[in-house]
Image (spheres, helix red, strand yellow):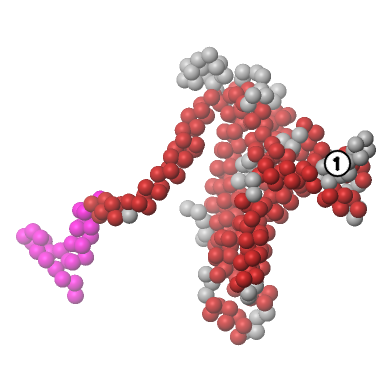
Amino acid sequence: MAATTQNKPGMVLDEATLIRDDFEKHYWKNIGKRILKDWRLYVMLVPLLLVFLFWRYMPMYELITAFKNSDTTVGVMERDFVGFQHFYNLMFGDASTGFWQAFRNTFVLSFYGLLFGFPMPIIIALFFNEIRSNALRSTLQVAVYLPKFVSLVVITSLTSMLLSGGSTLTGAQPGIVARALMSIGMVPQADAWVGMMSNPGYFRTIYQVTGIWETAGYGSIVYFAAIISISPTSYEAARIDGATKMAQIKHVVLPGILSTITIMLILEVGKLLTVGYEKVLLLYSTDVYSTADVVSTYVFRLAGIEAGAETNQSMGSAADLMNAVVSMLLVVGANTISRKASDTSLY
């Protein structure tokens, strides 16, 4: 029976109530003690907080330019308010053709990345889990992780060299990969000599293949960590029941990492319209705009040095804001569906 104490005449408090009251009374004091105890860890958070402050939150102030004109002779707050004029122009006006082309390319590139790129880290993690030699597994892991740490400029330059076209005037041959694909009949000779990088029909494939090569190995770390956390008794029970290796993967491994897969899938869905401009900008040219131009590069041209009209800066902000809003809705929708279907969600 819980101990009781007399707090006021006629009032009896049990021990649990006293402990809760004491905890609430000294809550912030205890928080302060814990922060002082681990102050070194909190100091290490300061650079990250500054990065988010200066590169994530403060730039949001410039989003109001999407609703104002681009009169650069005055400050942002002094510019005339034009409402949703830039959004209307992007969707239905003179800029609609370029914007919807970029929007479509962004979605298609991301969807292909989700369709072909998302399963690859899971497959690689399953492969690592079946390797019994620690030395061999460590060697292979280092090999597939390395592309993630290679500069994007180096990757795109290497891709351009391997897929470059030839020249009959200088005697230069097409890139080694282009020649290999031509020799097995996957690429016509004319395309190989002109250059695969200049053909809009090849851009999406090149983008996805190089993306998988660059990120699949590094992305497998999360799934491999989830796999090795599965209890060995689950494998033993499956073997006793006569489960083959494929049956163990199907009924033990995949259900064991299903929550991790769901969370990562929700995050990837949120990135469907956030294709970064860096890689596309390094790979594409005016010849492949029809399949390569995405929202981020479209905004770059609108608001960048290449833009000539003053109103382009505001239209660039409007395009970027539309892209961000749709991405947020995708995350919310995917999270809601996941929560209702599997009880696994981000929030």
Q: What x and y, as percent, mark residue 311?
A: 61, 20
**Residue 254 in the image: x percent, y percent?**
61, 68
Residue 211 shown left or right of residue 50 in the figure? right
Q: Is residue 11 above or below residue 165?
A: below
Q: Can residue 64 be seen in this view?
A: yes
Q: Which residue lies furthest to the top in this view?
A: 73
The quarter in which the N terminus is drawn is bottom left
In which quadrant of the rendered view does residue 307 lie? top right
For residue 315, above or below residue 336: above
Q: Quadrant of residue 236?
A: bottom right
Residue in the picture at 57% in, 82% down = 237
Kind of element beneath mark 1:
loop
> Residue at coordinates 68% horizontally, 79% vertically from top-left?
244
Residue 280 in percent (x, y) is at 69, 39
- 81 versus 6 height, above or below: above
Picture coordinates of residue 334 (x, y %)?
Answer: 58, 51
Q: Does the magenta stretch include residue 132?
A: no
- Foreground pick, 256 / 223: 223
Q: Can residue 86 be seen in this view?
A: no
Disc tally is 1
Which stretch is magenta? 1-28
Q: Residue at the far left: name it.
A: 9
User: Which residue is drawn at the image coordinates 21% and 65% (left, top)?
Assistant: 16
Horizontal arrangement in the rendering, residue 239 relative to residue 162 (left or right): left
Residue identified by numbered label 1: 165
Is residue 27 shown in magenta? yes
**Badge 1 amino acid:** Gly
Q: Residue at x 54, y 47 (%)?
A: 332
Dot 1, how many residues are within 10 Å of its Cα: few (below 14), some (14-19), or many (20+)? many
Furthest-front residue in view? 170
